[in-house]
Image: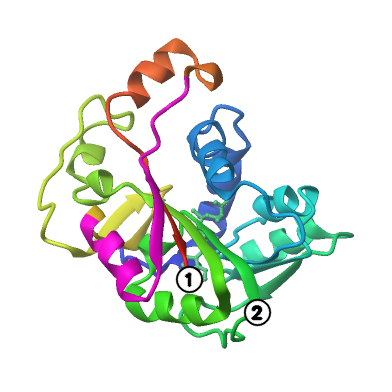
Amino acid sequence: MRMAHRGPKFYDNPSVFEEYRRRRARPDNPNDTIERPIFLEMVGNVAHSRILDLGCGTAELGLDFIGMGCAQYTGLEGSLKMAEAGRETLRGTIGKIVHAPIEEWDYPAGAYDLISSRLVLHYIEDLQSCFAKVHRALIAGGRFIFSVEHPLLTSSNASAALSPRRTNWIVDHYFDTGERSDDWMGASVLKYHRTIEDYFALVRRAGFRVTDLRESRPSLNRLTSEEYARRMRIPLFLFIAAEA
Ligand SMILES: C[S@@+](CC[C@H](N)C(=O)[O-])C[C@H]1O[C@@H](n2cnc3c(N)ncnc32)[C@H](O)[C@@H]1O
């Protein structure tokens, strides 16, 4: 069995990084056809907002936000390779990248109107203290919006082992939450499985008011009919929006 690495170290593996970029460059990847449109719909207007993006990766979201007129964009990223790629993406813009782990960065208090995070928080073990830091870093009434891999998928990876392109999904050990080791893109990564109710409770316990919850229902206008039928079978992502 391969040794599983934490998120930033996993993404710093050169072959994982290449494979990640290759997959994300495909125009039909579900991050762009399903996750991004729902995320941007939930975010709405960001004109004049000061934004912190947790686990920004290559910082395409930064370009979206800057294009929408935000006042400030800071991407926090733990992988050096991703942080460098993010700096390249934002070159010549107002956007900035900070290379630091989400768990250890010294968050300024009351400094942001919006804190975003796309597909990162399932890599974080202690989400309660992370959410407390996020809450303190927002102004009163500031927004926290994030997506994660859907809990139906993080519960068990038994179905991924059956065939590379899943035709059925195994949901198992759903309430047995905690660490999972996932073989993905040619290496092994540590993720943390939580139920939907766990995410909801963690957000509220940190002092937020939950304002929206979505589950990545696909939209036919961005997908082929075959892909649409597949994505109607099981949700890929969970989204939560909350207010401080
Ligand atoms: C699936 S990628 C998503 C990137 C970006 N948010 C997007 O949606 O395009 C996950 C990112 O989270 C980063 N990450 C994972 N755990 C992290 C941590 N503890 N601290 C900082 N970054 C982390 C990884 O390095 C990687 O860039």
Q: Give left or right: position of 172 versus 45.
A: left
Which residue is depicted at the point 61% across and 71% down? 76
Coordinates of residue 25 in the picture (x, y in percent): 63, 37
Q: Where is 99 relative to 146, above or below? A: below
Residue 61 visible? The answer is yes
Residue range corresponding to the magenta coloring = 197-219
Q: Give left or right: position of 62 versus 54.
A: right
Which residue is depicted at the point 30% across and 61% down? 199
Name the residue that disc number 1 marks: 244
Q: Secondary structure at mark 2?
A: loop
Instruction: Using the image as rendered, state which of residue 66 and residue 139 is in the foreground.
Output: 139
Amino acid carrying mark 2 in the image:
Ala
Instruction: Using the image as rendered, state which of residue 97 and residue 108 is in the foreground.
Output: 108
Name the residue that disc number 2 marks: 111
Residue 201 is covered by the magenta coloring: yes
Residue 78 visible? The answer is no
Coordinates of residue 185 in the picture (x, y in percent): 43, 47
